[in-house]
Image (cartoon, helix red, strand yellow):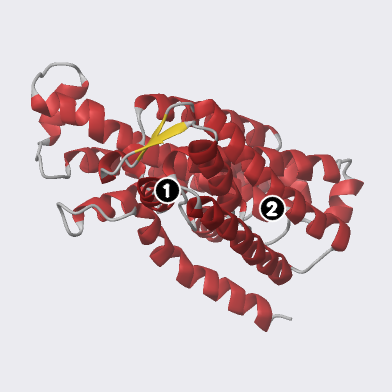
Amino acid sequence: MRHLAMENMQESYLRYTQRKVFIICLLFLLTILLGVYAINAGSAKASPSQVLLTLLGKTQGHLNIIIWNIRLPRVLAAITAGAGLSVAGCVMQSILRNPLASPFTLGVSQGAAFGAAVAIIALGAGSAHSASADAVIINNPYLVTISAFVGAMATTVVVLFLAQIKGVTPEAMVLAGVALSSLFSAATIILQYFASDVQVASIVFWTFGDIGRASWRDLEIMAVVTGAALIYFMANRWNYNALYGGEETAKGLGVDVEKIRMAGMFVASLVTAVTVSFLGIIGFIGLVGPHIMRRILGGDHRFLIPASSLMGGLLLLASDTLARTIISPVVLPVGAITSFMGAPLFLYLLSRGYSKR
């Protein structure tokens, strides 16, 4: 009888894991299909067969230039940035035990944007242009990333202080994020006040969030940082599962809560800083992606972390494709599209949080 019960439990657990693996594989397939569609979409129409031949190096001419220099880097940058922001939000929500946490809502993105703006305008790490296609060109990506990381970490230190020392509620933590966002926005405005007209226009355009400005060099740096962050987060998946049950439970299981929390916020801030330094502020992807997958898959971080990264990449790619096709040939800022998508969910989560008090 006991042997039969064990077999039933094993079969039930196998079905449980197979369903989650199937959903992750489905997300991966949807991302590839949407990527192919995104490469096809645009004023220069191309069939899937032409795209495939171009990617295999079988074609030449203007289509080859459009796909390899414009569309493919844009598609890959959207997937990479979306994955990084979404997994950063997933980890922030877990280690802070705050369903409203994300790089955008906690002000980490705004802090990174201020740091990047300082590097571009004051430290000469970027050159400003009047053309919207290349409003800001990054001359020294490493200096911009370091400056953005410093700005992001300044916000992170305050958030960790409030969460760990003061023990504030999730709602109060988000209010602190709003205050920090206002602080860094004001600092950016002061910086713009002393800049030239072209620099001001360029920085304003840059902060909208735009995937199209990513080059192969930028994509390389984002992919390395995001990939390393995913590896680190997956290596700590059991620690995050323990934290999901509460600090006391995690400590009882031998988890160094303070160390895991500090290191997790450090890596999440680095991913956010790299993304913001190249693409500008892209809001709510880190909030929407993890919440969708947590509702579908639950809180097991073995599956939630890869699923959140795939969902973030899929959402940002879909948003960017919509931004450049909805009123083509005009390309809308992708940050506006993601904000339209994420703001209603944020308000819902906030109202539900207050109603439970």
| Viewer-proximal residue among 189 and 254 | 189
Residue 167: image quadrant is bottom right
Image quadrant in which you'd find residue 59: top left
Task: Name the outermost residue toward the top.
Answer: 57
Residue at x 58% of width, y 72% of height: 349
Quarter occupied by residue 40: top left
Secondary structure of the residue carrying tag 1 is helix
Asked whether 1 or 96 is in front, the reply is: 96
Q: Is residue 15 above or below residue 166?
A: above
Note whether residue 21 is visible.
Answer: no
- Say whether residue 13 is left or right of residue 333: right
Side of 97 where 202 appears, left or right: left
Instruction: Give residue 345's position: percent from left, percent from top.
Output: 49, 69
| Front tag of 1 and 2 | 1
Labels 1 and 2: the sequence-earlier one: 2
Q: CA distance from mark 1 to mark 2?
A: 33 Å
Which residue carries the number 1 mark? 203
List the residue tagged with mark 2: 94
Q: Where's residue 247, x and y in %?
A: 84, 54
Q: How many numbered markers are drawn?
A: 2
Query: Which percent across, then down, holds residue 210?
Result: 36, 47
For mark 2, give the secondary structure. Answer: helix
Question: What amino acid is labelled 1 in the image?
Answer: Ile
Q: Residue at x 51, y 44 (%)?
A: 117
